[in-house]
Amino acid sequence: MSDATSDPNKIEAPTPDDPLAQAKALDNVDDRGRMLAADGTPLKRQLAKSLRIQKIRALALIAPLLLFVLLTFIAPIADMLFRSVENEIVSETLPRTVEALADWDYDSGESPGDEVYAALYDDLFLAQERKEHTRLGTRLNYELTGVSSLFRRSGRGVDDIGELYQDQFEDLNELWEEERTWAELMGSDEWLAAQEAWDEESGEPLPDFQLREGMPTLLPETSRQMLTFAEFIRTEDNESPLEEEPWTRVWAALYTDLTNKDVSGYSGPHTDLLQEASAAVGDFETTPIKQAFLDMDEDWGDPEVWGTIQAFSPDYTSGYFLNAVDMQKTPDGAAMRDEDERIYGLLFKRTMFMSLVITFSCILLGYPVAYLLATLPMRSANLLMILVLLPFWTSLLVRTSAWKVMLQSQGVINDVLVWLGLVGDANRLVMINNQFGTIVAMTHILLPFMILPMYSVMSTIPPSYVRAAKSLGATNVTAFRRVYFPQSVPGIGAGSILVFILSIGYYITPEIVGGTTGTFISNRIAYHISSSLNWGLAAALGTILLAVVLILYWAYDKIVGIDNVKLGG
Amino acid sequence: MGTTADSDAFVAFERVQKSYDGETLVVKDLNLAMPKGEFLTMLGPSGSGKTTCLMMLAGFETATHGEIKLDGKPINNIPPHKRGIGMVFQNYALFPHMTVAENLSFPLEVRGMAKAEREKKVKRALEMVQMGHFGGRRPAQLSGGQQQRIALARALVFEAELVLMDEPLGALDKQLREHMQFEIKRIANDLGITVVYVTHDQTEALTMSDRVAVFDDGRIQQLAPPDELYEAPQNSFVAQFIGENNTLEGVIEEIGGNRCTVKLDSGEVIDANPINVTQKGDRTRVSIRPERVEFNPDLGTTAHTLEATVREFIYMGDVFRTRLSVAGNDEFIVKTRNRADQKRLSPGETVKIGWLPEDCRALDAT
Ligand SMILES: Nc1ncnc2c1ncn2[C@@H]1O[C@H](COP(=O)(O)OP(=O)(O)OP(=O)(O)O)[C@@H](O)[C@H]1O
Ligand SMILES: [Mg+2]
């Protein structure tokens, strides 16, 4: 055409005049050029008002679901993220030790000084009374093996330290053997009176223990320990110091105070008793506190133990994450674990690899099925759809166990192969409790998640495209490759994301058919949650898994574009 | 008239039948011969088998019986991609994942054409449909009319000699449709291609085609040039289907040569032109075009006139439309040109109407 004008904007066929522009011209406009609504208020404000009401109504409608999602989905994830770094157990159980240890330098290669052991004595004694020392031992054992038994043993032995002095005080004077002696010596008169008057039947709470006036200066350490003791038995056991022999920790404190302090100025109940003890303590048999701990367990002299406690004393730690990537938080900083202890890297890699293989197998097996679903006549397509959906109506456990029946060495497939003579009876194929079994079973289980998105995309591709391609001269293969397949790619993408993300966190199937070589990272997470009870590590592993999925999702978005993913028409 | 295929026809259907389910024939005994360069339109009501015929020609459906020949050679066993027939689909079927230029270059690519030549041809084809600057766009970024042009260009770019179009303008609005009708006709003429065009729209069929095949019930009811189709319908289906038409029913009283007398059911007797009535006593339906009827006629002695009562008078600008009651038919329409001396009738008036006997065609009664 000689006169072919090729301006994109000009050769549009005639279109009717813009009706919108005409309508606008008729609208009311105020002197500032703003549109006015029918009642004269600015249109913008009216619109905002009506939209706001709509928004509030919409929000109210979704509120129950939002709340549900928040509580059951967002909150657990937040909790998991928090748990993966949370580490308050050390500083809560050993507060004084942590504080005293702050000045100690691990690199000196020496065990810390006496004041640290004194603090440890305080903390450990209380922890042992609260039965918290084993929990801490377990926690620190993740970082340094042996700490768990160290704490357990020390929990039992920590009483011995004070017993040494208790025995000597009791040998000195029989009065020390009576519970009342301590209460009368340390408690204030008002408290004593109140405690005497207290009647268990009345249901009133026990009176607060109060120290005798002057005691905190006279016997500071003893006062402190007595107070702790009295408070503890009152709140925890609902007992009164009048009827309870003090902890051995109090006896040790009394010994310390009497060796350091002059009590000659004291005049109150049991003055003689105290004076007598004060005179005698000089000859008491004693063990320095550090030595006492070393006697209990020589590991207390090991700088490694102290280094570990110091390294994990902050409230938040990267230790779980380091563990999750086969590293270790040592007193010197992060370091790789020994070769033979590295398992998580391997597991992550294996999980990725197997998920990829499963996704790929699902594409290979699912594509033709989805294609048939989309192109077969209604009746046969419906039948096929039922077959695809059938697995959804069967228990996951049943389906997985069925694969066990199929694949095991005395199973259906091996039997058939042996019967056909393809495989000797002696060397039946090992197809279960390994990667192969996991891949087969999971491919089968996740297949519908691949087929359905692919089908929903394919069913929107009109058959006229392929016909058009053929009429333009393309062979069946070319028409498929150049025209049909590219349009079905969004379905493949959607299915792949779904299957990959599902399989990366799959648990039941690998647990049942995976054996040792076919398990996923999720099985390890489950182990830490239910068996080893190392929730922090489980949370760190879970967080890493979540991050991997998000990164993959992001990468997919960058490369393919998430807009290309279609789950439905 | 194409009831037997000429041996030199470019496209020929010979006794073609088609059934999808083995029970009913969707196409019954189709015979059609088209010379090279013809623009033939298949026109018919929905479900009459037009698309089916097109699909058999394109190779997407196989004929249950009979033979289809292209350029003298039977093509029943040639797969679609080897037939070299260009096709424009109703929804255009432009590949959404390719640009306009890639769409156009697709048929050339699969034919193994070199890149430089491909580009040249694509450019020429785009210019032919006046879309030269749109090569880089995706189909989704084009308007309906523009997509239509691209679909046309794609069907033509590989120089197919035969192009099939299945309701290509169905999705466009009226103005655009008229514009595109003109474009398609012009391009088809310029290139000298043979076109089989399917449509619902009779105006489209009449304005564009060299010949129109009126389909009904799996058969070609009439195959004729547009003017002949309108002025000389061969049966009452065609008369009804094409244009506006008045019918009166009656029985043949006398028949001879190109004249017959018909006694209408209401008792009047009129003269008519016998088309497919053969003998006295046949029931017939006479057909008269609204614009061939005259008021107070002065048509000579041979014509009969009828009494009519005006029911409605509609002013339509260039024409007047008068609805009358004539011989028991309340829907009798007369169109008169808006001339200065044309009387404007008002409802209730009685008036004499008449027509030339040649314009009054006595057709089959069903
Ligand atoms: N794939 C098919 N399977 C079964 N029956 C079909 C199929 N395609 C068409 N038919 C039937 O064949 C008949 C003719 O259909 P066809 O599509 O040829 O009509 P058409 O003239 O193109 O109608 P329209 O103007 O509505 O497009 C219809 O009754 C239709 O139901
Ligand atoms: Mg059709």
Image (cartoon, helix red, strand yellow):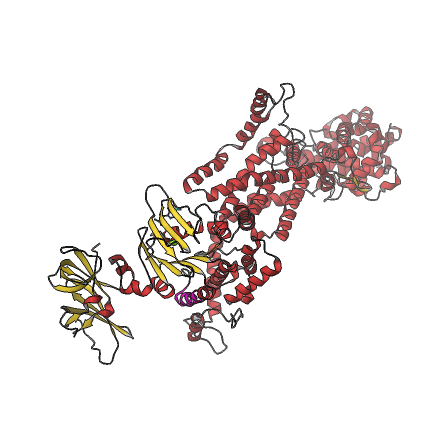
A127 part of magenta stretch: no
In the rendered image of this protein, does residue B87 appear above or below residue A272?
A: below
Residue B241 appears in the picture as rendered: yes
Which residue is painted at 34% across and 64% down in the image? Answer: B206
Compare residues B313 and A69 and report the one nearer the observer: B313
Outermost residue on the bottom side: it is B340
Which residue is painted at 86% across and 31% down in the image? Answer: A291
B180 part of magenta stretch: yes
- Give the quarter of the figure containing the C terminus of chain B: bottom left
Outermost residue on the front side: it is B7
Compare residues A143 and A309 and report the one nearer the observer: A143
**Left or right: A203 as drawn, with respect to B288:** right
Compare residues A280 and B28 and report the one nearer the observer: B28
In the rendered image of this protein, does residue A24 appear above or below residue B272?
A: below
Compare residues B65 and A565 and report the one nearer the observer: B65
The residue range painted magenta reads B172-185
**Left or right: B284 as drawn, with respect to A511:** left
Residue A256 position, x and y percent, is 83, 35
- Give the quarter of the figure containing the N terminus of chain B: bottom left
Residue A308 position, x and y percent, is 79, 38
**Left or right: B9 as drawn, with respect to B245:** right
Residue A41 position, x and y percent, is 45, 71
Q: Main secondary structure of the magenta part?
A: helix
Residue B191 position, x and y percent, is 47, 64
Which of the 4 image quadrants contains residue A282? top right
